[in-house]
Image (cartoon, helix red, strand yellow):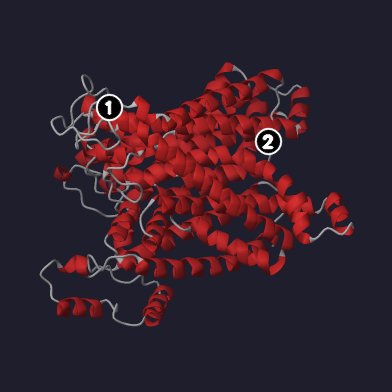
């Protein structure tokens, strides 16, 4: 019941924040120099054409009216119409979220396993050579510019070794994959398209590897820190003093207590990764959510920018809430 | 991704980890601090003496030799514009180090002030300030960057403001939490009873004491700031060619990589990586030391 009250209070706190984000995004895209309709009309368009296009997207109305219309649409789940493509922003976004999610889900899953195994191994050897090497690895992952790492992997994996495809998309177009969810590996499996499965998997390797190196470092540090905390706790010392078997100690005491904080951390990593994969997507021409948002920004496609800002902000604030709640459920000592 | 690193490390900063291990531990921490400080000193020296160390000018073009491989007249080759990579990698230390340090300094000042005020006065002021901080923290970096550039014009100052705006919320939170726990301590009550004004209490007592965690986070933050700057430039939203900046140079060379021409983008990225690693080592060492003290 306390958790329920806590969630409701936090959700209420989110309302002013999200409203602030909506207002800020709405105003900011409109102060950017550049005209969204000019970029779709081309050079030979007359002033009348531009005025007609502006009227079509409601850009001729007062700022207040535009904002109210936008809010009214948002409440009913309508993100508006893209100025560049003329499609509904909601359905366009749905197509772009799939590829990014595919990338992030695979990378975060791998990172979680690596971080758990290495983090606990490292904590058990605290301040010995093995531990120091793991910590150096985490520091390197924390310091490496991931877009550059992506380029280096392309250089080695494609240009020099030729093992992986060029960074020009998500699947070989010759495999005639029918898009369903946008996540190509899933689509290929669902349509039982053998060549597409192989191709999509090959295209996934390098970007996933790039993302894993960036994501694993903070997770690894956190797991190592929690494991150390458990190893030096009185309850662990007591269990050890009672002569419990190593296996029981390892799985029943160390692993369990260490992993309490991991789900909330995973939520955090996951939520922030949606908005921050833009650099990796850019390097591999992944055409996911991040690149879609960036393109909208460069072409001043107001509805696209507004929608992407809102979604990124929503992910960000929600994962912090989820992280807190999950942590509270798993660890009864936490008071909300 | 820099925000993610900030968010996650902020999470672990709230719960100090007790690390055991006596001499070996502090020796490792000391070694990290020494190596990190050495790397950063070298980068700073390179930034200052770049004109003496580079055979070519920062934006000097050798029109007869575009995209030539390393060797001969050009130690690390040239880019597609015929500019010398080695010289530009050295010169870039100026902008990268300068912008990152200035941005973090600005973020520390603004964030600390906000955190002090919010934590000390509490109530509705605290609520309003923290919601504003929330809005800034949840706003995507690259959109903020472009908007600030559009509002104030393109340039170095605006990049500093943008990166500071992204990083200031973390300091505001950190200092606010610190102030709120410090306020409960008897020495603050003593100061108030002996007639100190609120400003006096804030300035003389709470500020110096709440800066301890800030000092530990700031070096790590400089590294993230540098990665953010380079990322923005890579996407074409930060420093642009022909100015020498590591991220912009990597971006210019990105297309060459597919053809196997590594020298346009690998050296600037390596320089960026080593410099950020310097900040990380320094920050991690300081954090270890702070944790050991808390124990």
Q: Is residue B163 left or right of residue A159?
A: right
- B5 and B119: which one is in front? B119
Q: CA distance from mark 2 to mark 1?
A: 39 Å
Q: Is residue B22 left or right of residue B138?
A: right
Residue displayed at 13% across by 31% down: B64
Residue displayed at 72% across by 24% down: A244
Q: How many marks?
A: 2
Decide: few, some or many residues near mark 1? Use Cα within 10 Å; few <14, some 14-19, many ≥20. Answer: some
- Asked if labels 2 and 1 share a chain, the reply is no
Q: Is residue B54 above or below residue A51?
A: above
Residue displayed at 27% across by 22% down: B75
Q: Position of residue A38 (x, y in %)?
A: 20, 69
Chain ID of residue with mark 2 = B
Quarter residue A120 falls in? top right
Quarter containing the N terminus of chain A: bottom right
Q: Position of residue B94 (x, y in %)?
A: 41, 37
Q: Is residue A74 visible?
A: yes
SS under mark 1 = helix
- A120 and A249: which one is in front? A120
The residue where tag 2 is placed is: B17
The residue where tag 1 is placed is: A156
Q: Position of residue A255 (x, y in %)?
A: 62, 33
**CB under 8 Å between callouts 2 and 1?**
no
Chain ID of residue with mark 1 = A
- A223 and B219: which one is in front? B219
Q: Position of residue A37 (x, y in %)?
A: 23, 70
Q: Is residue A126 visible?
A: no
Q: Is residue A308 left or right of residue B133?
A: left
- B205 and B173: which one is in front? B205
Quarter containing the C terminus of chain A: bottom right
SS under mark 2 = loop
């Amino acid at each position: 019941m306390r958790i329920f009250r806590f969630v409701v209070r936090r959700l209420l706190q989110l309302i002013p924040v999200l409203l602030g984000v909506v207002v800020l995004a709405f105003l900011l895209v409109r102060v950017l120099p550049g005209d969204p309709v000019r970029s779709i009309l081309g050079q030979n368009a007359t002033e009348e054409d531009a005025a007609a296009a502006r009227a079509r997207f409601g850009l001729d109305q007062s700022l207040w009216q535009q904002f109210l219309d936008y809010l009214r649409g948002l409440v009913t789940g309508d993100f508006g119409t893209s100025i560049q493509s003329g499609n509904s922003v909601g359905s366009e976004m749905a197509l772009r979220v799939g590829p990014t999610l595919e990338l992030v889900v695979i990378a975060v899953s791998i990172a979680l396993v690596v971080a758990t195994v290495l983090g606990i191994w490292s904590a058990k050897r605290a301040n010995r050579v093995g531990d120091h090497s793991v910590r150096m690895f985490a520091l390197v992952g924390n310091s490496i510019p991931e877009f550059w790492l992506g380029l280096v992997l392309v250089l080695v994996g494609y240009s020099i070794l030729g093992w992986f495809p060029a960074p020009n998309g998500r699947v070989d177009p010759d495999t005639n994959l029918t898009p369903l969810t946008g996540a190509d590996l899933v689509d290929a499996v669902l349509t039982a398209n053998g060549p597409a499965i192989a191709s999509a998997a090959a295209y996934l390797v390098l970007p996933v590897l790039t993302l894993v190196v960036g994501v694993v470092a903070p997770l690894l540090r956190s797991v190592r820190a929690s494991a150390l905390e458990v190893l030096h706790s009185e309850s662990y010392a007591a269990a050890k003093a009672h002569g419990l078997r190593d296996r029981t100690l390892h799985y029943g005491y160390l692993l369990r207590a260490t992993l309490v904080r991991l789900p909330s951390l995973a939520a955090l990593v996951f939520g922030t990764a949606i908005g921050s994969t833009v650099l990796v997507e850019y390097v591999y021409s992944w055409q996911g959510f991040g690149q879609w948002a960036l393109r909208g920004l460069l072409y001043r496609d107001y509805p696209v920018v507004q929608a992407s800002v809102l979604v990124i902000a929503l992910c960000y604030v929600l994962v912090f809430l989820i992280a807190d709640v999950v942590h509270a459920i798993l660890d009864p000592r936490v008071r909300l | 991704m820099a925000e993610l690193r900030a968010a996650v490390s902020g999470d672990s900063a709230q719960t100090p980890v007790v690390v055991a291990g006596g001499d070996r531990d502090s020796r490792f921490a000391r070694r990290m601090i020494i190596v990190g400080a050495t790397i950063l000193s070298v980068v700073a020296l390179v930034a200052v003496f770049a004109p003496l160390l580079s055979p070519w000018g920062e934006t000097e073009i050798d029109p007869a030799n575009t995209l030539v491989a390393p060797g001969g007249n050009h130690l690390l080759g040239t880019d597609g514009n015929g500019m010398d990579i080695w010289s530009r990698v050295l010169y870039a230390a100026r902008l990268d180090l300068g912008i990152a340090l200035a941005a973090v300094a600005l973020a520390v000042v603004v964030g600390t002030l906000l955190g002090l005020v919010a934590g000390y006065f509490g109530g509705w002021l605290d609520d309003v300030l923290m919601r504003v901080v929330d809005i800034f923290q949840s706003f995507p970096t690259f959109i903020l960057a472009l908007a600030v550039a559009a509002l104030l014009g393109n340039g170095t100052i605006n990049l500093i403001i943008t990166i500071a705006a992204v990083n200031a919320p973390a300091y505001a939170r950190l200092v606010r939490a610190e102030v709120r726990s410090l306020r409960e301590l008897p020495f603050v009550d003593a100061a108030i009873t002996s007639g100190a004004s609120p400003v006096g209490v804030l300035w003389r007592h709470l500020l110096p004491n709440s800066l301890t965690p800030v000092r530990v986070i700031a070096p790590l933050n400089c590294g993230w700031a540098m990665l953010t700057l380079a990322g923005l430039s890579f996407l074409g939203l930060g420093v642009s060619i022909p100015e020498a900046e590591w991220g912009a140079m990597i971006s210019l060379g990105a297309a060459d990589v597919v053809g196997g021409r590594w020298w346009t983008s690998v050296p600037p990225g390596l320089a960026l990586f080593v410099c950020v690693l310097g900040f990380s080592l320094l920050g991690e060492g300081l954090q270890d030391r702070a944790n050991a003290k808390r124990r």
